[in-house]
Image (spheres, coloured by chain):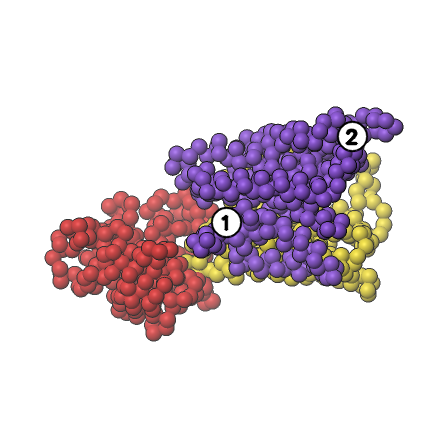
């Protein structure tokens, strides 16, 4: 469904991605693990169109999307839940969700109902300004907003970052549910333990390159977690 | 050289001072819409000095610079912490206040059979020090350009010094500069005062070139022009604002045949130029490239 | 007392035109975080188109209003494409100076078409002022006030009750999040520019037909008053723009009466300077262009 081939993305002279390739299969959860600074967020931002790659190709359902702007990529069915959440702080929860559905020409009231049912906390706070929500609620809202565009592929960048353990569990429960409903997911996570529970396939990236890929269990979990946190070079 | 060419070259020199002062703030990271007011302060102060108090021009010009620096510092102090559009608007507000004060400024003394001095919106005529001393336009032109070259030498020396690097660091990211141990407030105040003095020097010369000044000379149009000169010419070197002035005044004078259309052509060219060179013709990269060749 | 009431009435009328100017300015500023110096000159150009059409054909006021709005909108779109669309990231100074360059362009274009310094513009209302006891009220002022209220109401509906409005507010809130939600920031910016310039064109039309004359100074005047009212209202807030415009109008009418025009303007700038230096809490604290 998504094919990333030999991707190079640079900030000025510093290359954050140095020829990275990966693939996401339709209907799967694919997880990207790696230490800080490995280029995970750069990868997500490049796929979403926020960053322009210097080299390489990104294909979604056979169509090249590497030169498109973010809103055009959303229109093709790829939505990013960014790392820092980025909700519209001065707009209500409901308005945030409407904004998420901006691209859709079809009536989406049913989807809105379903999504609010999935996130009861958001339903309670529907008319509240998003800026007044807690960190976990904002994360839920960011996910819900991305879902409003009815993506075929959901990109999630560290959805558990900085959240309380109970909220993290809820997030992963939702990820599992979305997967069951047929959404493909590319997930970047520091929390390798949780991520490996839901993922069918994972990539380990270090210093801008894929250094290992496989299905959970193909590498001993403690070895994997060690490398995901620390990187093999320093181990 | 004919009188017309002398006039054009003198004007290029005069407006270079105020353009340099706006450029200085631009390099330090702030857009000022207010340098014209300090140009005006200099013009009035020097005019009063020579025409009313009988001072020689050098003394009057020095006094004008001191007053310009003081006025700029006075405006600068309460606005040191303002960034972006807030600072820009504060400088505009201050400059307009000063212009209105010029309009309200009446102080005339009897000299011989005429009254001399600022007369509100009627302006200030009779700043004739040059005529009385018999200084020819060509001599005045030389004086303006010698002073300008002096200023440029200082600018170019500062550019290659630690102070220059500190200034650019401030312009690039004031928070980063602050955390690097730079006394941002003091530096900014110094820049503002230096810019005020520089503009005032230009104003002092302007008053003696024209012999007549009025508050309208120092309105926002001059301020925005000064700022535009630096940005068109380039932020990379102090030659940038000079290039801007030469392009504007020089091109305007050279294209008299286009009478009536030149701002349409020139305005469009500037807008298009900034699309491709948002930091001006002589931006940091071009300057770096030239240096590496030299 | 009667003077005070009369001044207040005049101030409200004046303030409603400032409010309209500030609304347009604020919309652009909110979406782009950039000051558009060519905002007023675009309005001036629109009004010059209308004046030109009036001199050539003598058509009615309604058409003149349409021409003024259409002309301002076109000029505004031109400014956006040339000065703001290319400088979306960074380069705030370049965008501002580019808009100044187009200001010069518009001014010359206007004086080229109509070279005299001053042109008569047909009056909005030919009859005399209404009297309410000892107070007098110009019908033009009444029209201006009503128009301002109608435009605010319509704008409120657009911004808070439409799909387009959601997109506009999303872009104002966070351009990055808007893009990631599928909203084209570039398209919304252009649309907002057109909308704001149209509002400005209407304000310009009301002002010149109220004054029954048009000069190229309208350009600078509109930019300055719009910017001033926006800053007084707290920068980037739409209700603030209305409040700022009305406050500016009231203050000008009163201080003009007591102090004359020079001190009136002096106080306006002093107030702005002090407000900027002190930065009361209602003024937006985001660092912004």
Is residue C9 among what the camera can see?
no
Instruction: Describe the element under mark 1 as helix, strand or loop.
Output: loop
Is residue C81 among what the camera can see?
yes
Q: Bin the neighbour count of mark 2 within 10 Å (Cα to Cα): few under 14, some 14-19, many 20 and up.
A: many
Nearer the observer, B189 or C58: B189
Nearer the observer, C28 or B226: B226
- Furthest-left residue in this view: A220
Q: Is residue B40 left or right of residue A198?
A: right
Q: Is residue C264 above or below residue A78?
A: above
Residue B142, label in figure: none
Q: Chain of mark 1?
A: B
Q: Tell me the residue at 67%/56% (across/down).
A: B251
Chain letter, red in picture: A
Q: Is residue B37 above or below residue A59?
A: above
Q: Is residue C83 left or right of residue C109?
A: left
Among the two numbered marks 1 and 2 on one chain, the one whose residue lies closer to the N terminus: 2
Chain letter, purple in picture: B
Q: Tell me the residue at 70%/31% (across/down).
A: B57
Residue B117, label in figure: 2
Nearer the observer, C207 or B24: B24
Residue C16 picture quarter: top right
Chain letter, yellow in picture: C
The residue to which callout 1 is attached is B236
Instruction: Describe the element under mark 2 as helix, strand or loop.
Output: loop
Q: Tell me the residue at 54%/59% (across/down).
A: B275
- Measured from the top left, where is residue C174 in percent x and y? 46, 51
Q: Is residue A131 left or right of residue B192?
A: left
- Measured from the top left, where is residue C108 in percent x and y? 72, 57
Residue B271 picture quarter: bottom right
Q: Tell me the residue at 40%/40% (across/down).
A: B176
Q: Chain of mark 2?
A: B
């Amino acid at each position: 469904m998504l094919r990333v081939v030999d991707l190079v993305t640079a900030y000025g002279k510093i290359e954050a991605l140095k020829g990275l390739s990966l693939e996401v299969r339709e209907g799967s959860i694919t997880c990207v693990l790696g230490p800080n600074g490995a280029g995970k967020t750069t990868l997500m931002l490049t796929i979403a169109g926020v960053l322009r790659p210097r080299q390489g190709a990104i294909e979604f359902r056979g169509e090249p999307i590497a030169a498109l702007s973010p809103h055009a990529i959303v229109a093709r069915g790829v939505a990013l839940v960014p790392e820092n959440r980025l909700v519209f702080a001065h707009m209500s929860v409901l308005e945030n969700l409407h904004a998420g559905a901006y691209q859709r020409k079809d009536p989406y009231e049913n989807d809105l109902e379903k999504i609010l049912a999935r996130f009861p906390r958001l339903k309670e706070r529907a008319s509240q300004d998003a800026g007044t929500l807690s960190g976990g609620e904002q994360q839920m809202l960011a996910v819900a907003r991305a879902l409003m565009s009815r993506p075929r592929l959901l990109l999630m960048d560290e959805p558990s970052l900085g959240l309380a353990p109970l909220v993290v569990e809820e997030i992963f429960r939702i990820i599992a549910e979305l997967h069951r409903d047929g959404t493909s997911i590319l997930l970047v996570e520091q929390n390798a333990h949780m991520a490996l529970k839901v993922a069918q396939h994972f990539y380990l990236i270090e210093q801008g390159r894929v250094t290992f890929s496989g299905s959970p269990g193909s590498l001993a979990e403690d070895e994997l977690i060690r490398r995901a946190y620390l990187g093999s070079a320093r181990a | 050289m004919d009188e017309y060419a002398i006039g054009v070259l003198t004007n290029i020199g005069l407006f270079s001072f105020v353009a340099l002062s706006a450029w200085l703030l631009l390099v330090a990271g702030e857009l000022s819409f207010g340098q014209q007011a300090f140009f005006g302060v200099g013009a009035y102060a020097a005019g009063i000095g020579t025409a009313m108090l009988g001072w020689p021009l050098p003394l009057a010009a020095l006094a004008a610079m001191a007053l310009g620096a003081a006025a700029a510092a006075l405006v600068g102090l309460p606005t040191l912490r303002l960034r972006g559009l807030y600072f820009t608007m504060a400088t505009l507000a201050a400059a307009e206040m000063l212009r209105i004060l010029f309009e309200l400024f009446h102080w005339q003394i009897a000299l011989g059979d005429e009254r001399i001095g600022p007369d509100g919106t009627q302006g200030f005529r009779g700043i004739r020090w040059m005529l009385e001393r018999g200084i020819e336009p060509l001599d005045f032109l030389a004086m303006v350009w010698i002073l300008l070259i002096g200023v440029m030498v200082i600018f170019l020396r500062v550019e290659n010094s630690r102070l220059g690097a500190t200034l650019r660091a401030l312009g690039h990211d004031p928070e980063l500069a602050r955390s690097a141990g730079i006394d941002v407030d003091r530096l900014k105040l110094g820049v503002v005062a230096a810019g005020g003095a520089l503009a005032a020097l230009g104003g002092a010369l302007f008053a003696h070139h024209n012999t007549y000044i009025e508050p309208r000379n120092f309105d926002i149009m001059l301020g925005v022009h000064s700022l535009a000169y630096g940005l068109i010419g380039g932020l990379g070197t102090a030659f940038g604002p000079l290039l801007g002035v030469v392009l504007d005044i020089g091109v305007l004078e050279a294209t008299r045949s286009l009478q009536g259309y030149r701002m349409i052509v020139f305005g469009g060219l500037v807008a298009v130029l900034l699309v491709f060179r948002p930091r001006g013709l002589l931006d940091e990269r071009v300057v770096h490239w030239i240096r590496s060749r030299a | 007392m009667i003077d005070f009431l009369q001044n207040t009435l005049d101030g409200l009328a004046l303030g409603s035109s400032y409010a309209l100017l500030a609304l347009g300015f604020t919309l652009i500023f909110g979406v782009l975080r950039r000051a558009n110096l060519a905002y007023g000159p675009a309005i001036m150009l629109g009004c010059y188109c209308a004046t030109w059409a009036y001199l050539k054909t003598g058509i009615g006021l309604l058409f003149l209003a349409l021409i003024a709005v259409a002309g301002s909108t076109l000029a505004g779109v031109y400014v956006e494409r040339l000065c703001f669309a290319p400088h979306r990231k960074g380069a705030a100074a370049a965008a501002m100076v580019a808009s100044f360059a187009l200001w010069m362009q518009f001014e010359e274009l206007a004086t080229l078409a109509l070279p005299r310094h001053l042109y008569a513009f047909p009056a909005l209302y030919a009859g005399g002022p209404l009297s309410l006891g000892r107070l007098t009220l110009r019908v033009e002022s009444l029209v201006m006030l009503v128009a301002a209220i109608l435009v605010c109401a319509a704008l409120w509906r657009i911004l808070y009750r439409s799909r387009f409005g959601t997109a506009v507010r999303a872009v104002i809130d966070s351009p990055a999040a808007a893009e990631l939600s599928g909203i084209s920031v570039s398209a919304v910016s252009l649309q907002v520019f057109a909308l704001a310039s149209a509002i400005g064109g209407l304000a310009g039309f009301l002002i010149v037909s109220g004054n029954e004359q048009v000069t190229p100074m309208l350009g600078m005047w509109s930019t300055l008053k719009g910017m001033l009212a926006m800053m007084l209202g707290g920068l980037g807030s739409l209700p603030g723009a209305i409040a700022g415009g009305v406050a500016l109008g009231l203050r000008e009418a009163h201080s003009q009466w007591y102090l004359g025009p020079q001190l009136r303007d002096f106080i306006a700038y002093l107030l702005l300077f002090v407000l900027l230096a002190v930065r009361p809490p209602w003024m937006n604290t985001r660092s912004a262009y």
